[in-house]
Image: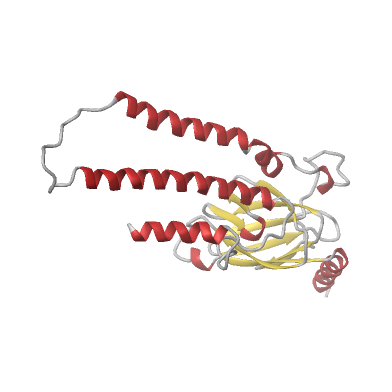
Amino acid sequence: MAVPVLGTAIVFGAAMENPIAGYWLPESIGPRTESIDGLINLVHLILGGVFLVTGLVLTFSLWRFSADRPGKASTRCGSLLLELLWTLIPTAVLGWLVFYQATLWDENKVNIPLSAFPDSEGDYASALPTARVVARQFEWTFVYPGADGQFDTRDDIFSPGLLVLPEGTDIVLELVSEDVIHSFAVNALRLKQDIVPSLNSLIWFKVTRNGECEINCTELCGWGHYRMIATMRVVTNTDYAAWKKLQMDKLQR
């Protein structure tokens, strides 16, 4: 019993305010991550309560019906009341969580910010994302439109393993896979989106401060899955414009 109890204590401790806080998730660099962290902690509290109750019931049952106690255990074919309790209670909790997190889901997965496409007037068909994320076994490549403002042309900017983004700006990325299913994940943004072959998808977010963080693939995509890592570097808008100009100048040489 000590192993699961200690493991649960470490998980909860890493999510709360104490000497080991911060080992559960890295420091946030996005504006909506506090709400996501709150939802994660809430789910863990519910699961921790379920673990505690079932552990106590199991411990009591082992003590109450142990072999060295007199009497013979009775045999039961089932209990309708128990069946209803452990079916209806989880159903109610899961149903409540669906509605509780609906607004957060819309913000992160449904409502594309119009400010991310300032020149499109809401016409997503003609709007361009900030960059295209190309996933393949076992590397990330990031593609930016060049001077012509279009993808799949000769002046596209290719940045293997490094995603450079401007600070404080709504970012939209197009996700593409060239082989199997991958998953684009940035833990510092509490961001994750699967990338399915032949299905280009969009993901959007905003980064509120400069710095670097790690990009991972969180879908088992083959033997080299463990080394499918890239870097996301967030810079000021001025530095971002200078970086893109430098990359375009390199193409013209």
The image quadrant that residue 132 belongs to is bottom right
As drawn, the residue found furthest toward the front would be 70
As drawn, the residue found furthest toward the top would be 80
The image quadrant that residue 135 belongs to is bottom right
Q: Residue at x 49, y 63 (%)?
A: 225
Q: Quadrant of the C terminus?
A: bottom right
- Is residue 181 at all visible to an observer of this figure? yes
Q: In the image, is residue 47 above or below residue 15?
A: above
Would you say 167 lies left or right of 221 here? right
Q: Quadrant of the N terminus?
A: bottom left
Q: Residue at x 49, y 58 (%)?
A: 11
User: Toward the viewer: 223 or 250?
Assistant: 223
Q: In the image, is residue 32 above or below residue 123?
A: below
The image quadrant that residue 72 belongs to is top left
Residue 15 is situated, as x and y percent measured from the top left of the image, at 57, 58
Residue 221 is situated, as x and y percent measured from the top left of the image, at 49, 58
Q: In the image, is residue 194 above or below residue 102?
A: below
Would you say 155 lies left or right of 9 here? right
